[in-house]
Image: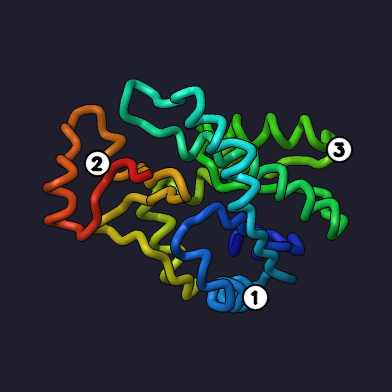
Amino acid sequence: MKWLVLQGYTVVCYLADVGQADAADAAAIEKKALLLGAERMVIVDLQRIFVEQLVFRAIQCNAIYEDRYLLGTSLARPVIARGQVQVAEQFNCQFLSHGCTGKGNDQIRFELAFKALNPSLQVIAPWRLSEFCNRFHGRQDLLKFAAKNNIPVSSSPKAPWSMDENLVHSSYEAGILEDPGRTPVSAFDHFLHFGAVSGNVL
């Protein structure tokens, strides 16, 4: 978001509350967004829609990947994207943006939903733009940018991954988790070293 502001865009920040813990502190989220240059912050509670339209149906058909992954992230994306398009239309935005990397499937989940719902909205995907990728070669560069611009973030050089959390589960990405040459730490070891258990919770 800060990078978009520095590029000259007027930014309306959007947060979909699908049951992640930090969404409960709406006042702090809005304060942070406005402090970093957003024109406004819009937080939409989508928990009921998420459960009734996707989670219940996923449970009914036992939608679990490889008998252990509860698909919480992929289930939430269409709901989040639909809400984002609605907010963009409400505030007459011309662009939609997301922070998905250029190698994952989340960019596809979001952008197919965007195109289906309103194909006139253009997408800004910074991780696919050469000017962004030339400046930020990875998470460490982003952490330095955050420190320089006084952006509080939960990631750190010692725990350089992010967590996606919602009513269905929590999942982790980046850091050593994406290095195919290393075996990920067990959930128990992760709990001992970092104070959180990696995996699924229903």
Q: Earlier in the sequence, mark 2 or mark 3?
A: 3
User: What is the crowding at mark 3: few (fewer than 14 residues within 10 Å), some, or many (at least 20)?
Assistant: few
Q: Residue at x 65, y 64 (%)?
A: 43
Determine whether 170 is above or below 145 in the image: above
The quarter of the displayed image where residue 127 is located:
top right
Disc 1 and disc 3 in contact, CB within 8 angstroms? no
Which element type, helix, strand or loop, lies under badge 2? helix
N-terminal of the pair, mark 1 or mark 2, is: 1
* Residue closer to the observer: 58 or 173: 58
Residue density around tag 1, few if under 14, some if 14–19, many if 20 or more, within 10 Å: some
Position of the N terminus, as image quadrant, is bottom right
Q: Position of residue 85 (x, y in %)?
A: 76, 46
Left or right side of 180 for 14: right
Rounded to the nearest whole Å, what is the CA distance between mark 2 and mark 3? 39 Å
Q: Which residue carries the number 1 mark?
A: 34
Where residue 134 appears, as percent x and y from the top left, is: 51, 45
Quarter holding the C terminus is: top left
Percent x, y of residue 58: 51, 30
Residue for badge 2: 176
Residue 146 falls in which quadrant of the image?
Answer: bottom left
Q: Secondary structure at mark 1?
A: helix
Element on which disc 3 rests: loop
The residue nearer to you, when weighing 42 against 51, is 51
| Amino acid at dot 3 | Ser
| Residue under pointer 3 | 120
Residue appearing at x 12%, y 48% in the figure: 189
Give the Cα distance between marks 1 and 2: 33 Å
Q: Is residue 103 above or below residue 1?
A: above
Q: Amino acid at mark 2?
A: Ile
